[in-house]
Image: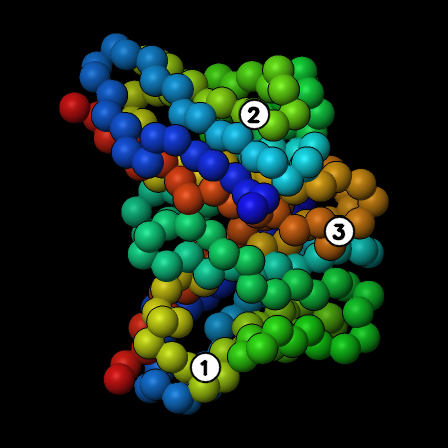
Amino acid sequence: AQKITQTQPGMFVQEKEAVTLDCTYDTSDQSYGLFWYKQPSSGEMIFLIYQGSYDEQNATEGRYSLNFQKARKSANLVISASQLGDSAMYFCAMRGTNTGNQFYFGTGTSLTVIP
Amino acid sequence: DGGITQSPKYLFRKEGQNVTLSCEQNLNHDAMYWYRQDPGQGLRLIYYSQIVNDFQKGDIAEGYSVSREKKESFPLTVTSAQKNPTAFYLCASSSVGGSVKNIQYFGAGTRLSVL
């Protein structure tokens, strides 16, 4: 069974500071992909960053980076230089080779950036 | 521009009424998905389809029905059997195949309320 766990219901960060959002996962698949999405108050889910289980380097996309620790089964999202527009819900998701084309989502973390 | 269009943005249902949520994509994706999101919660899979004229139940399919007559379209019907339909509904699509990197893209969502 596939499972994504996000243990931080809410987080606060000062503007211009960095913040880490936690994500742990459980899977028996050898090959899998990990994704982070941002959901602003408008509701649309915006894809941020992807990490493959066989990728040797941590993924980076602009101010977003993924701290991937395979042995610990964690895929934490790091947002550097936080901006007010980063205030949103953030979801971690996973897709495995043995789950067809299903994605599995965590319960999300609400991030609030304080001016 | 390629993307996923959901309509309407807001929908109201009367008791005993069936309502249909529209989802259209021009990304040439084979797989399409419907999720339900309740306030402060994560995404729960209702139905998904990997190919035209075929679809599979997700975790909470009871009270919902879908069709996939065209690759571009995956409408969701919320039937009168769904006793608690008030929620935010998100449609998504992705490519299929052996890669776990196939990203899932989302529409802007439909907010359904019961009158």
Q: Is residue A88 visible?
A: yes
What distance separates the C-alpha of mark 1 from that of mark 2? 39 Å
Which residue is label 3 attached to? Answer: B100
Q: Mark 1 Cα within 10 Å, few/some/many (few <14, many 20+)?
A: some
Q: Is residue A14 above or below residue B11?
A: below
Residue at 21% over, 17% down = B14
Which residue is label 2 attached to? Answer: B73
Please state the chain letter of the residue tagged with numbered disc 3 in the rendered image: B
User: Under tag 3, what secondary structure?
Assistant: loop
Q: In the image, what residue type sits under mark 1?
A: Val
Residue at 16% over, 24% down = B115
- How many numbered callouts? 3
Q: Nearer the viewer, residue A20 or A60?
A: A60
Please state the chain letter of the residue tagged with numbered disc 2 in the rendered image: B
Q: Quadrant of the N terminus of chain A?
A: top right
User: Under tag 1, what secondary structure?
Assistant: strand
Q: Measuring from the top left, give residue B26's x and y in whole percent.
A: 60, 36
Asked if labels 1 and 2 share a chain, the reply is no
Which residue is label 1 attached to? Answer: A19
Q: Mark 3 Cα within 10 Å, few/some/many (few <14, many 20+)?
A: many
What distance separates the C-alpha of mark 1 from that of mark 3? 27 Å
Q: Measuring from the top left, give residue B31's x and y in whole percent.
A: 66, 34
User: Under tag 2, what secondary structure?
Assistant: loop
